[in-house]
Image (cartoon, helix red, strand yellow):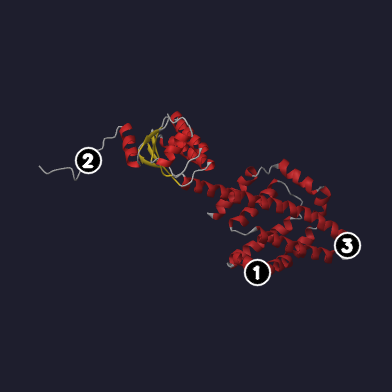
Amino acid sequence: MADGKLAWMSRALPHELAVDEEEVARRKEFLEFRDEDIEQLKGLRELARKYADPVIEEFYRHILSFDETKAFFRDPKVLARVKQLQKDYFVRLTEGDYGAAYVANRLKIGAAHEHVNLEPKWYLGMYAFYLRLVARRLQEAFASEPSRAMTAFLSLMKLVFLDVGLAVDTYIHAREATMRKQQEAIRELSTPVLQIRERLLLLPIIGVIDTHRARLITDSLLRAIRANRAKVVVMDVTGVATIDSKVANHLIQTVTAAGLMGAKVIVTGLSSDVAQALVALGLDLAKLETVGDLQGGIEEAERLLGYEVVRTGAGAQPG
């Protein structure tokens, strides 16, 4: 299931992140990653194949020496698999094809790292160590040509920073998506809209209402009215101690908006302080239908919907 999710993400991410050919070209231009850099990297192909095994082994020895990163590779099969993937990547850096397929693969890797909760600080630290290993091998290979080693390393750095940028984008995208989901969950918890009968909703409001929360209440209520085809809503404000003019206006607008969607709102539980505050604010309260308490509000809502309440039990006498 996890592999399937990552495969889907790798297909969806380029579109979601707007990483198309034009965007990739612009990033390469900013990094000054040019044709001569591609040729430099292609010239390292045999060297990459020669050093792939020792570089990767030393890389993972370093990773496994820290508890924070070792924790990701407790399964020997997982370790063997990622080592092979890392070797493939090491060689792929020198293949010269850095188009759509390459970019999609880097986004997929970034998504995989985020998926297993590998924090960016470790990911970036790994890359720094990785580059040091590569720099050392380049210096050894071109000991008599230090300028060539430097030129090749700079070309590699440009490509690596392209890769890192793509991976960081996936981290940010995933974290923002998580935050949106959390905010949505908090919003639903703070403004619960309950269906208590067919076409009858209950909106209990508890605590302080500021302008932001008032907007959330409106949004949640209107979506619930549409989803449940509601005709009557009981808005209970028993748990609200104070309401200022902005919030009061917003709630009145909510009642109006609900009416435009075909739902009648009954407000219950107004405290004496809130009622006096509303009057003192001089607001037009003609559109508010109020009932003293929640039970009375639900009974009135049921009456409007045509329900008949029949008493049973204590009031009945045996014949």
In depth, the one of 132 and 193 nearer the eye is: 193
Do the CB atoms of the residues marked 1 and 3 lie less than 8 Å apart?
no
Q: Which residue is mark 3?
A: 146
The correct choice, above or below, for 76 with respect to 179 in the image is below
Q: Quadrant of the C terminus?
A: top left
Q: Residue at x 29, y 34 (%)?
A: 307
Which amino acid type is shown beneath numbered disc 2?
A: Arg
The correct choice, above or below, for 138 with respect to 16 in the image is below
Q: Earlier in the sequence, mark 2 or mark 1?
A: 1
Q: Which residue is mark 2?
A: 311
Which amino acid type is shown beneath numbered disc 3?
A: Pro
The reply to whether residue 50 is visible in this rendering is no
The correct choice, above or below, for 134 with respect to 26 in the image is below
Q: Residue at x 79, y 49 (%)?
A: 31
Q: Which residue is mark 1?
A: 66
Which amino acid type is shown beneath numbered disc 1?
A: Phe
Q: Position of residue 20 (x, y in %)?
A: 69, 42
Q: Label 2 vs label 1: CA separation?
A: 71 Å
The answer to whether residue 102 is left or right of residue 202 is: right
Q: Residue at x 40, y 41 (%)?
A: 272
Q: Label 1 vs label 3: CA separation?
A: 33 Å
